[in-house]
Image (cartoon, helix red, strand yellow):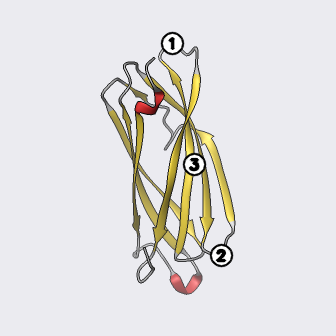
Amino acid sequence: MNDVTAIRVDTVPEYCADDSRPEENRFVFRYTITVHNGTDETVQLLARYWKITQGSGNEQEVRGKGVVGKQPLIAPGESFSYTSHAVLDMPVGVMQGAYTFCDATHTRTFDIAIAPFRLAGPHQVH
C-alpha cells in the first residue's frame, strides 16, 4: 500500500436548531464526514474514536466499531460519506478523533487522525 496519508477525512458540522432545546442546555449538531481513499488499495473502516470537548471543558470519548452501523470498504479513488450527530450541553464544542482502517488483505491496521473541528450554535464565535 502506498502512503496512508493519502486517506483524507473531511468534516462539515451544522447546528440543528429544530432539534436543540437551549432552555434545557441541549444543543444538537449534525456532522457529515467524507473519507477519501487516495491510496492504490481498497481499505476498510473498522472502528472510530471521538473526543468531544464541550465549551465547559468537559470531555466525552466515544469508541465503537465502524460508523453508523457499517464497516465500509472504500476502493482506490473512491469516497464514503455519512451523517451523524452529537448532543452537547453548551452551544459550542470541539470534536476530534481517529478512524482505524485495515488494508485489503487484512494484514495491517492503521489509524488516520481526524483534525479538530468546531461545533458552534447561533451567535457563537467561529
Residue lying at 62% horizontally and 64% vertically, measured from the top left: 53
- In the shown orientation, is residue 66 left or right of residue 74? right
Q: Position of residue 120 (x, y in %)?
A: 46, 72
Residue 38 quadrant: top left
Q: Position of residue 106 (x, y in %)?
A: 55, 16
- Tag 3 residue: 97
Given the current orientation, which residue lies at the most extreme left position? 77
Q: Secondary structure at mark 1?
A: loop
| Quadrant occupied by the N terminus | top left
Which of discs 3 and 1 lies nearer the camera? The answer is 3
Residue lying at 57% horizontally and 77% vertically, measured from the top left: 90
- In the shown orientation, is residue 93 left or right of residue 81? right
Q: Are marks 3 and 1 in contact (CB under 8 Å)?
A: no
Q: Position of residue 61 (x, y in %)?
A: 67, 54
Dot placed on the residue nearer the N-terminal end, 3 or 1: 3
Q: Amino acid at mark 3?
A: Gly
Residue lying at 51% horizontally and 12% vertically, measured from the top left: 105
| Quadrant occupied by the C terminus | bottom left
Q: Secondary structure at mark 3?
A: strand
Above/below status of 89 relative to 64: below
Who is closer to the viewer here, 124 or 32? Answer: 124
Give the label on residue 56, or none: 2
Above/below status of 119 relative to 109: below
Above/below status of 66 relative to 40: below
Q: Secondary structure at mark 2?
A: loop
Above/below status of 4 relative to 87: above
Q: CA distance from mark 1 to mark 2?
A: 44 Å
Q: Crowding at label 1, few (<14), some or many (≥20) Cα neighbours within 10 Å?
A: few
- Tag 1 residue: 105
